[in-house]
Amino acid sequence: MRAYVINRFGGPEVFEAADLPRPEPGPGQVLIRVAASSVNPVDCKIRRGDVPVGPEFPAVLHGDVAGVVEAVGAGVTAFRPGAEVYGCAGGLQGRPGALAEYMLADAELLAPKPASLSLEEAAVVPLVAITAWEAIIEKGRAQADEAVLVHGGTGGVGHMAVQLARWRGGGVAATASEAAKREQAQQLGAECVIDYRQETVSQYVQRCTGGRGFDLVFDTVGQPALDQSIEAAALKGRVVTIAGRSTLDIKPAFQKSLSLHTVFMLINMLHDYDKAAHGNILREVGGLIDAGTLRPLIHEQRFGFSEVAQAHALLESGRAMGKISLVAD
Ligand code: NDP
């Protein structure tokens, strides 16, 4: 089968076309004819060699996938050949990813594609929606009438988080750097939009919460936003981060306020592939998408798999809004 692989770590230029054997599904596995994928920051980190979870060379990267079931392994009853599915299921050590004609996935990590999305649209959803769900609903336990702040409100994870927090009934604030992103954040449901380069934390805490602070802060950025997340939280507020490696990342000046809050780290989600919950979360997310409650925000410039290098360069430039989609070619 045709695939795009890396044979060394490095910049976006390391991608190259290759012919690989088509895999066969083992017990519990689904073989997917890949229609589309998307770029997540972790794909760039793996490509650069920055995280110790890269697959063996030649490495097929990218976890997000949407496609059509080609075959199923022993014991798989949830999906039949011909079904359209989506999920986040590979691109890591021992699990080749989606940048190929076919990809193997554990059936428990997949869900039926939301009916209202094309395969291309569905492929941008899995990793960011699972992450936002775990942060806002499971760890953050966002409640109606709570004030929620999402740092990075138009990013991949952030734009899902804003919509999920809104769905839970909370008042949502979101940060965004450019005017177009701020307008988009508002359209996603943020009532209070923050240009973090213009306003100090105390200014926006005053403007958005009357000075009380946010009950739940979701940091999708890491430093320096992580310190600001701690500073912006209300007394006994909850802070969830996916981009801090430990509480030691937090500046000493804010360490002392840590005891006043609950801080959750979601740094290991990608290692958590044994978790059948991911397929279940994607079923819930699919329901919200089909009900019109959640919608993926897709960057306007589209890419084919053969343009994966350009797509990585765009993500790393920080200029993309929402998700970058990649269609099999
Ligand atoms: P994106 O690149 O799509 O979004 C990042 C966002 O950060 C952008 O919206 C950007 O928008 C904002 N941003 C950048 N710098 C700053 C800053 N100084 N202050 C405030 N906002 C800033 O990435 P994702 O949303 O897909 O992922 C975010 C991070 O979370 C990545 O590091 C990723 O690897 C990690 N992640 C971790 C997971 C886990 O389980 N631990 C799972 C998924 C993602 P703006 O233009 O407004 O600055």
Image: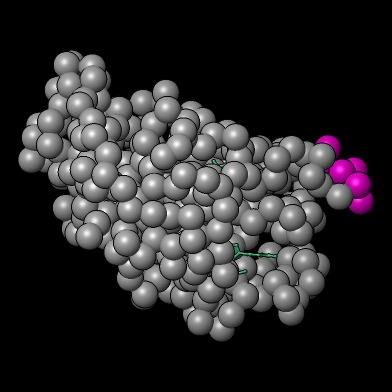
Residue drawn at point x = 36 percent, y = 75 percent: 300
Image quadrant assignment for residue 277: top left
Classify residue 206 as left or right of residue 47: right
The answer to which of 162 and 21 lies nearer the viewer is: 21
Residue 115 locus on image (x, y percent): 16, 53
The answer to which of 135 and 113 lies nearer the viewer is: 113
Residue 103 locus on image (x, y percent): 27, 38
302 inside magenta stretch: no
Residue 68 visible at all: yes
Residue drawn at point x = 52 percent, y = 45 percent: 8
Classify residue 293 as left or right of residue 128: left
Residue drawn at point x = 39 percent, y = 54 percent: 16
Q: Where 298 sits versus 233, above or below?
A: below
Q: Where 225 sits versus 139, above or below?
A: below
Residue 276 locus on image (x, y percent): 36, 26
The answer to which of 313 and 1 lies nearer the viewer is: 1
- Range drawn in magenta: 252-259
Ligand 1 image position (quadrant): bottom right
Q: Where 310 sits versus 29, above or below?
A: below
Q: Where 14 sits versus 134, above or below?
A: below
